[in-house]
Amino acid sequence: MKERITKYLDTLINKGSVAIKLQFKKPRKSSKKYRFKEDPLGEEEKYSPIKGIVHKFGNRILWKITYRCAAHCQHCTRTRQIGTPDGDLTNENILSGAEYIRNHPEIDEVILSGGDPMFTVLDTMDALNELMKIETVKVIRIGTRMPLHSPDSFKTKHFKELLKKLRLIAKKRRLLVLVHINHPDELTRKVLNVLHTIKKTGAEILTQTVFLKGVNDNVEALEKMCITLYHNGIRPYYIYRCDYVRGLERFIVPLRKEKKIMTDLRKRLSGPAYPIYVIDLPDGRGKIPPPLDFWKNTGSSRTCFDFDEKKIRI
Ligand SMILES: *Cc1c(COP(=O)(O)O)cnc(C)c1O
Ligand code: SF4
């Protein structure tokens, strides 16, 4: 994956944000000692019935609209694909994706993903138009980092059209926008204003965060991030353990440390400001919350479920 960064993020790095620098700049010396696989979650081989679609769970699917993003996050779970044209969908791809969804009425939720579906606004609007014709789709989720990669884009004509469309969709379907945010430095006034604008369409905004070594593996940063979101009407929703993807080795935080942070954070944060901590298990069970330090005999014992850090290492 090539380095790619927006002017806006560059300004924040120049002002001294280490958390943003670590997420977007390649390290000067990159280690070639890879321990992980490229696609540990098996998105390509096992679960993709049709170009763009990942159907792993019965009722909900990912629809990857693009592999392009305004900036490239060095910790991206899809580093193998980001910035390549391989994920571009033709009009036919979009129609056949919609056809697949129509033929599977058990799918009640479609998660537009990528890449960043808000970066390729026009294709995303085509996909949204198709989805609105399918009665069985009750929930649309859009995963994006565009508000913090490029907040100024939201003033452009295409984005005004997208926001208009979101307003129409929110009247007819449940509409969630999941914004990937990792650190309070990302929540500038400009970014919060964009999030407010999206919220005004009637979409609900949730966030997803990834534990990243050196970026947010401390309780103070996460506390500040969650409180800022909460006070601004945004629900901190997920915090993931970083996936064991090739090239991401340097970002992995020790599991014990993450569990301690999440345990401490529970005391510091109001309930609705506290995100769910999950690990996307490579065996297909999905995003599973690991036991925290509140209980004795969890973690290594088998009282909850068979969860052992060594076992999930790849
Ligand atoms: C995360 C994910 C989903 C959504 O799962 P939730 O538990 O509803 O967040 C759906 N499909 C795939 C392939 C996913 O990775
Ligand atoms: S915006 Fe999302 S998909 Fe794009 S590089 Fe960042 S984490 Fe990956």
Image (cartoon, rainbow, N blue to C red):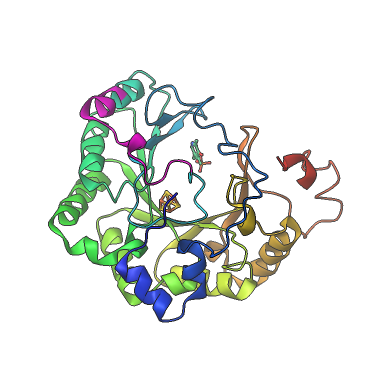
Q: Which residue lies furthest to the left in this view?
A: 157
Any part of residue 138 in sight = no
Chain part drawn in magenta: 80-96
Q: 124 and 237: which one is in front?
A: 124
Q: 290 and 271: which one is in front?
A: 290
User: What residue lies at 43% left-to-right and 21% top-to-bottom?
Assistant: 49
Q: Position of residue 114 (x, y in %)?
A: 39, 43
Q: How many labels does the image show?
A: 0
Q: In this view, does 119 lie to the left or right of 57?
A: left
Q: Position of residue 296 (x, y in %)?
A: 85, 55
Decide: is 37 above or below 268: above
User: What residue lies at 83% left-to-right and 42% top-to-bottom?
Assistant: 303
Q: Residue furthest bottom?
A: 15
Q: Does the magenta stretch include residue 254?
A: no
Q: 9 and 180: which one is in front?
A: 9
User: What residue lies at 56% left-to-right and 59% top-to-bottom?
Assistant: 275
Q: Is residue 255 left or right of residue 58?
A: right
Any part of residue 198 in sight = yes
Q: Does the magenta stretch include residue 93?
A: yes
Decide: is 225 above or below 251: below
In which quadrant of the rendered image does the C terminus lie? top right
Q: Position of residue 132 (x, y in %)?
A: 24, 34
User: What residue lies at 36% left-to-right and 41% top-to-bottom?
Assistant: 84
Decide: is 194 above or below 122: below
Q: In this view, does 248 lie to the left or right of 97?
A: right
